[in-house]
Image (cartoon, rainbow, N blue to C red):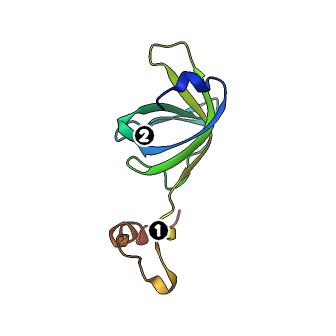
Amino acid sequence: MTEPERYHNKNVRVRGRIKQGSIVASIEDGRPLTHFTLLGENSKELAIISREEPPDSFEAGKMCIVEGRMFDWGRTDGYSLEATRITTKCPSKYAAEGDEVPSGAADLYEQYRSVPAR
């Protein structure tokens, strides 16, 4: 995220947190279109554009990995990553065998354990 011009028109994988208030979802030509901002280390920001349906666990504040191609769209806001894949952390991974929750993950696990499946 610190040198996006270095990766112009190249496939990349970045990791960060989805910025609060940055998700804008719409439909374009009958397909989902999602814009959001990914926050990296040192509060570096990267605009993300996805033309695929985001994962069920996609929401602001979550850590995610985004794979795609870096582009300079010729706008004043600089580089964006056009996502081909978005992966968010799955809450079920925080549960140990027998519903024992690993130390430090109890709050996160409880937050998502009661959410019904879609």
Which residue bears the numbered disc 2?
40
**Is residue 85 left or right of 35 when viewed as pictured?**
right
Which residue bears the numbered disc 1?
116
Residue at image position (66%, 24%) is: 9
Residue 103 vs residue 90, the one in the foreground: 103
Tell me which amino acid carries mark 2: Gly
Residue 45 vs residue 112, the one in the foreground: 45
Tell me which amino acid carries mark 1: Pro
Q: Is residue 31 visible?
A: no
Residue at image position (62%, 36%) is: 12
Dot 1 or dot 2: first in sequence order is: 2
Q: How far across and down, in percent of the image, does residue 70 sit?
A: 60, 28
Q: How far across and down, in percent of the image, does residue 95 sit?
A: 47, 75
Image position of 118 with respect to 84: above or below: below
Secondary structure found at label 1: loop
Q: Is residue 118 visible?
A: yes
Image position of 62 with respect to 10: above or below: below
Q: How far across and down, in percent of the image, does residue 56 sit?
A: 53, 55
